[in-house]
Image (cartoon, grey):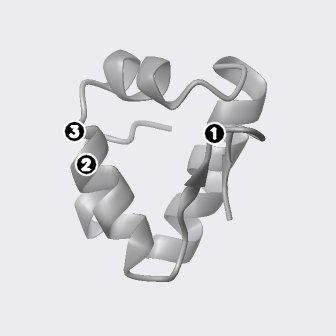
Amino acid sequence: MDLANFEKMDPIMLMSIVNLKLRDDFDGDLNELVKFFDIDRAALEAKLATAGFEFLADIGQFR
């Protein structure tokens, strides 16, 4: 799934997709994920924060 239009996605669905990608394709490395999809990390984190999610680097997931 392409995350280019993440700003229009439901934040709960977005969190699920991002966590899946982090787990399966990027070994929990958020910097690599945003680089691969050419998206702004701060904007992604802000979008997910609207639903109360934050990135936990120690587990490589949003919770």
Q: Is residue 2 left or right of residue 23?
A: left
Badge 2: residue crowd in 10 Å (few <14, some 14–19, many ≥20): few
Of residues 46 and 11, the one drawn nearer to the viewer in this rendering: 46
Q: What residue is at 47 percent from the left and 25 percent from the top?
A: 33
Q: Is residue 6 left or right of residue 21?
A: left
Q: x, y percentage for residue 38?
A: 25, 24
Image quadrant in which you'd find residue 46: bottom left
Q: Which residue is mark 3?
A: 40
- Mark 3 and mark 1: span between their CA atoms? 17 Å
Residue 25, how many percent across, how many down?
Answer: 68, 20
Q: Secondary structure at mark 1?
A: loop
Q: Is residue 16 above or below residue 9?
A: above
Position of the C terminus by quadrant? bottom right
Along the horizontal axis of the image, is 14 left or right of 60? left
Amino acid on which the number 1 mark rests in the picture: Ala
The amino acid type of the residue labelled 2 equals Ala
Nearer to us: label 3 or label 2: 2
Q: Amino acid at mark 3?
A: Asp
Between the residue at mark 1 and the residue at mark 2, the CA separation in whole angstroms equals 14 Å
Residue at 51%, 31% in the rendered image? 30
Q: Earlier in the sequence, mark 1 or mark 2?
A: 2
Is label 3 in a helix, a strand or a loop?
loop
Q: Are marks 3 and 2 in contact (CB under 8 Å)?
A: yes
Residue that carries the numbered disc 1 in the rendered image: 57
Q: Which residue is mark 2?
A: 42
Whether 12 is drawn above or below 22: the answer is below
Residue 16 seen in this snapshot: yes
Does label 3 or label 1 sit earlier along the sequence?
Answer: 3
